[in-house]
Amino acid sequence: MKIRIAIIEDHQLVLQSYELYFKNTGTVKVMDTFNGGTVFQKNFPRIHHAIDLVLLDLKLPDHKGTDIIGWIKTHYPKVKILVLSSYEDTATIVQCICKGADGYMIKNCSYSELEEAIVKVYNHMPHLPDTISWATVKAMTPQMKLIASLKPQELEFLQHTASDRSYGEIALLMNKSPKTVDNYRNDLFRKLQVRNRTGLVLKALAYNLISI
């Protein structure tokens, strides 16, 4: 039985090339294609029962690819996800795995390499590019999960802490009450495992959460 896949890719020529290649293989069958996240989310509930794996391009015109990963795993956790992207940096790859992707491929791979990765992921064998090891992913996973858990207001507060403003002045800038800002500070102390403002700024810089 062929592996049934859906492809999310906004470049039509690339999409057509995948369809043409898989049409002539005995292992993979393209069931549907989508040129963006919105149309995918609208139509996938109708066809999810007929899809084993989603081949996902991260760079979409209307959604973050990582948000689509999270959406699929929240609503259809049994569906496998293989990311196919031009992004080669370790942080992006780890972020996708943390979100729930079952594998990651770089777009300069050959069609046969892509087919092999699809088969691996379908058979519950996670796949990564040769440039990164699972040891690296495991080491970075706690950090990436922590970053993903931070709220926009907490990130804004973090940036202000790198200035010489008092917490009261930060509260005015953020249009929040002093108590709310104190809660941001205390929650971030706990999440980043620091005890004071200096430690907070140093940890935020180490995690590339702020710039100075």
Image (cartoon, rainbow, N blue to C red):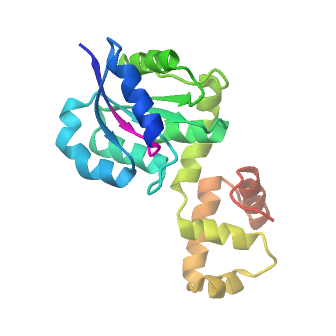
The one nearer the camera, 45 or 114, is 114
Q: Is 180 situated above or below 145?
A: below
The quadrant of the rendering that contains the N terminus is: top left
List x then y, in percent, for residue 61: 47, 55
Quarter of the figure with residue 186: bottom right
List x then y, in percent, for residue 211: 76, 62
The answer to whether residue 69 of the structure is visible from this angle is: yes
Q: Which residues are magenta?
A: 6-11
The one nearer the camera, 151 or 123, is 123
The one nearer the camera, 59 or 66, is 59
Quarter of the figure with residue 174: bottom right
Q: Is residue 114 left or right of residue 92?
A: left
List x then y, in percent, for residue 51: 26, 31
Q: Is 41 situated above or below 111?
A: below
Q: Which residue shows up at 59% across the image and 55% down it? A: 191
Q: Which residue shows up at 64% across the image and 61% down it? A: 189
Q: Is 202 situated above or below 184?
A: above
The one nearer the camera, 66 or 152, is 66
